[in-house]
Image (cartoon, rainbow, N blue to C red):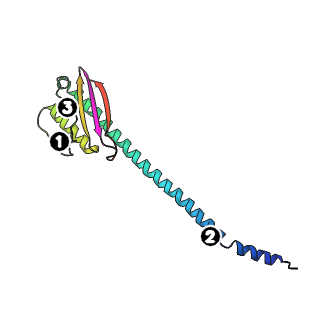
Amino acid sequence: MNLRTSDDMSRLSIRRSKGLTLIEVLIALIVLSVGILGLATLQTASLNFNNSASHRTQATVLAYDMADKMRANRAAALAGDYDIALEDPPPACAAPAAVGTVAAQDISSWRMALACRLPQATGSIARAGDQVTLIVQWDDSRGQEAPLQFQVTTGL
């Protein structure tokens, strides 16, 4: 008859579970690594969304700024001096031209502000009576989708 004592039993259970804690630690490290990768992905998406929101804010501010300039020079705006189409390709960021009429200077400075503050940005202004539609177009997709547009219609 072979009877085992409690010391023999504890030694036997230690031998059987020798690698178990190492496997548990490895699994915990894998779970932690996946969680950290998920957080990094979430942070990257958050940065992209914040960048996109910043571009939308800039487009809104620039469109309303141009509308205010047109209201300040209402006679020229009603005469069609501010009517412009979207440029293709968009203008490059450079110093605006300081020659010509007030309307020409406003348009030049607006287009340069668009080009300098937004990626691949351009704008258009279309008038119908005393209503004016301003469109700001920019590429927010990093070349993967069609350009985004912000459009506002306002009275002069």
Identify the residue at image location x=24%, y=41%: 113
Residue 99 horizontal/vertical position (percent) = 11, 37
Residue 20 horizontal/vertical position (percent) = 66, 69
Left or right: residue 85 versus residue 5 is left
Amino acid identity at mark 1: Pro
**Counting residues from the N terminus, which is met first, the one under dot 3 or under dot 2?**
2
**Counting residues from the N terminus, which is met first, the one under dot 3 or under dot 1?**
3
Q: Which residue, given by chain and number where applicable, does mark 3 sit on?
A: 84
User: Of tags 3 and 1, which is closer to the observer?
Assistant: 3
Left or right: residue 115 versus residue 25 is left
Q: Is 134 contained in the magenta span?
A: yes
Q: CA distance from mark 2 to mark 1?
A: 67 Å
Q: Which residue, given by chain and number where applicable, does mark 1 sit on?
A: 96
**Counting residues from the N terminus, which is met first, the one under dot 2 or under dot 1?**
2
* Residue neighbourhood size for the residue with mark 3, other residues' Cα within 10 Å, grouped as few (<14), some (14–19), many (≥20): some
Disc tally is 3
Q: Is 34 contained in the magenta span?
A: no
Mark 2 falls on what kind of element? Answer: helix
Residue 143 horizontal/vertical position (percent) = 31, 46
Q: Is residue 77 above or below residue 23?
A: above
Q: CA distance from mark 3 to mark 2?
A: 70 Å
Mark 3 in CB contact with mark 2 (< 8 angstroms): no
**Which of the numbered marks, if any, corresponds to residue 85?**
none
Q: Which residue, given by chain and number where applicable, does mark 2 sit on?
A: 22
Quadrant where the C terminus lies? top left
Identify the residue at image location x=75%, y=75%: 12
Amino acid identity at mark 3: Ile
Q: Is residue 156 visible?
A: no
Mark 3 falls on what kind of element? Answer: loop
The part of the chain drawn in magenta is: 130-140
